[in-house]
């Protein structure tokens, strides 16, 4: 199985309990990061005479759902061009329920996302406030 993890290190705010590498980022920082990520995908292309298409792609973070539908689509297009994506690949995007809406979810699906990992810490508002 061939897999790719794409780290999106940006969050709306840094949660006090989170140990993952992440930071609050401006839209400009996010845009610059996506451009550099796409460039790195090309630079790091594996030199393989018989490339195997990717079976899994995981957008983790941070909060990857801060990316626009267009940014996710651009990244996946570059991945497909550079590495290939299996027709039955599992393509996951971590999402915070507070950062997505139905239109975004539809757009992510149309861009190629076929699985969501929702970061729900609690369904209790008091506990959520306690967590930060």
Image: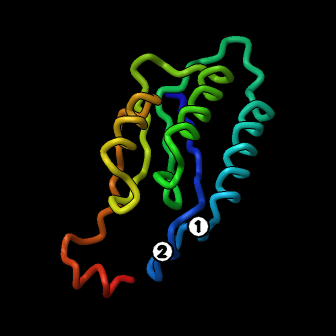
Image coordinates of residue 63 in percent, x first then y, are 49, 58
Q: Secondary structure at mark 1?
A: loop
Q: Secondary structure at mark 2?
A: loop
Q: Residue furthest right?
A: 43
Relative depth, front residue between 109 and 37? 109
For image coordinates 70% across by 37% down, the residue present is 38
50 vs 4, left or right, is right
Image coordinates of residue 105 in percent, x first then y, are 35, 42
For image coordinates 52% across by 45% down, the residue present is 68
Q: Residues within 10 Å of mark 2 (few under 14, many from 20)?
A: few
Relative depth, front residue between 47 and 26? 26
**Residue beneath disc 1:** 22
Residue 29 vertical position relative to residue 72 in the rendered view, above or below: below
Question: Are circles 2 and 1 on residues that touch, CB within 8 Å?
Answer: yes
Residue 26 vertical position relative to residue 124 in the rendered view, above or below: above
Image coordinates of residue 131 in percent, x first then y, are 35, 83
Q: Quadrant of the C terminus?
A: bottom left
For image coordinates 70% across by 59% down, the residue present is 29
Q: Quadrant of residue 98?
A: bottom left
Image coordinates of residue 10 in percent, x first then y, are 58, 62
Residue 102 vertical position relative to residue 118 in the rendered view, above or below: above
57 vs 106, left or right, is right
Q: Residues within 10 Å of mark 1 (few under 14, many from 20)?
A: some
State the mark number for residue 18: 2
């Amino acid at each position: 199985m061939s897999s790719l993890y794409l780290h999106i290190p940006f969050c709306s705010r840094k949660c006090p309990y989170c140990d993952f590498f992440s930071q609050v980022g401006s839209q400009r920082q996010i845009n610059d990061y996506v451009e550099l990520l796409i460039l790195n995908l090309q630079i790091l292309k594996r030199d393989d005479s018989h490339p195997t298409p990717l079976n899994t792609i995981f957008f983790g973070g941070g909060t990857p759902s801060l990316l626009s539908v267009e940014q996710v689509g651009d990244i996946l297009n570059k991945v497909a061009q550079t590495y290939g994506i299996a027709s039955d690949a599992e393509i996951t995007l971590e999402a915070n329920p507070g950062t997505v809406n139905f239109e975004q979810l539809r757009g992510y699906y149309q861009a190629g996302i076929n699985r969501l990992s929702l970061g729900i810490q609690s369904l209790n508002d008091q506990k959520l406030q306690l967590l930060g």
